[in-house]
């Protein structure tokens, strides 16, 4: 491509962008289309979504909706008193090693190095979120990883 064609192509792109921007900003249609926080919550609630604050949600434990399942879990907890529940607080710049060591110290996992390797091998270590997470010692590595990354 020679210099004149490249300059013509560049001028065409700039001209087209200017036309589109003029129509977009000149019509005034974009104004007022962004809902306020309250309007967004109200719209989501009307559509059947549950809107909560992330920190409030992290502190709650998820209760099963199936009553049979609920009674089975209560029976299991009575039979197996060795289930350990732990709330881990993941801070900014916390490494996978620190998280794995913390989980191992609280008897959630048996081997910190194995869990760390799992997190690294499956690319979960790059997706760890900040916040409070409730975990138990009967969770599989995949469940722990999903909890820490969502």
Image (cartoon, rainbow, N blue to C red):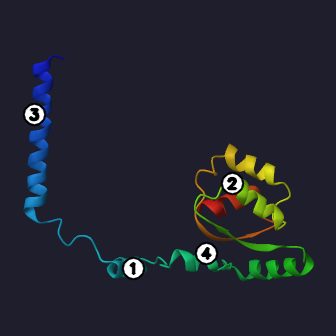
According to the picture, the residue beneath numbered tag 4 turns out to be 58
Residue 114: percent from left, percent from top: 80, 49
Name the element at disc 2: helix
Give the residue at the far top of this rendering: 2
According to the picture, the residue beneath numbered tag 1 turns out to be 41
CB contact under 8 Å: marks 2 and 1: no
Q: Earlier in the sequence, mark 4 or mark 1?
A: 1
CA gap between label 2 and label 1 equals: 34 Å
Work out whether 94 lies above or below 46. above
Quadrant of the rendered image containing residue 93: bottom right
According to the picture, the residue beneath numbered tag 2 turns out to be 96
User: Comparing marks 3 and 1, which lies closer to the viewer?
Assistant: 3
Q: Residue at x 53, y 74 (%)?
A: 54
Residue 109: percent from left, percent from top: 82, 60
Name the element at disc 4: helix
Q: Quadrant of the N terminus?
A: top left
Work out whether 70 lies above or below 99. below
CB contact under 8 Å: marks 3 and 1: no
According to the picture, the residue beneath numbered tag 3 turns out to be 11
Query: Within 10 Å of the Cα at label 1, are there few (<14), some (14-19), or many (20+) other Cα atoms?
Result: some
Q: Quadrant of the C terminus?
A: bottom right
């Amino acid at each position: 491509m020679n210099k004149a064609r490249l300059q013509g192509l560049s001028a065409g792109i700039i001209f087209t962008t200017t036309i589109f921007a003029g129509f977009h900003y000149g019509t005034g249609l974009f104004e007022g289309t962004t809902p306020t926080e309250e309007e967004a919550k109200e719209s989501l609630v009307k559509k059947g979504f549950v809107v909560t604050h992330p920190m409030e949600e992290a502190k709650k434990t998820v209760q099963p909706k199936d009553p049979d399942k609920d009674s089975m879990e209560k029976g299991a907890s009575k039979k197996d008193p060795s289930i350990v529940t732990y709330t881990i607080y993941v801070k900014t710049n916390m490494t996978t090693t620190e998280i794995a060591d913390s989980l191992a110290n609280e008897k959630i996992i048996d081997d910190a190095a194995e869990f760390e390797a799992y997190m690294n091998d499956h690319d979960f270590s790059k997706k760890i979120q900040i916040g409070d997470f409730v975990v138990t010692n009967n969770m599989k590595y995949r469940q722990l990883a999903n909890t820490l990354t969502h």
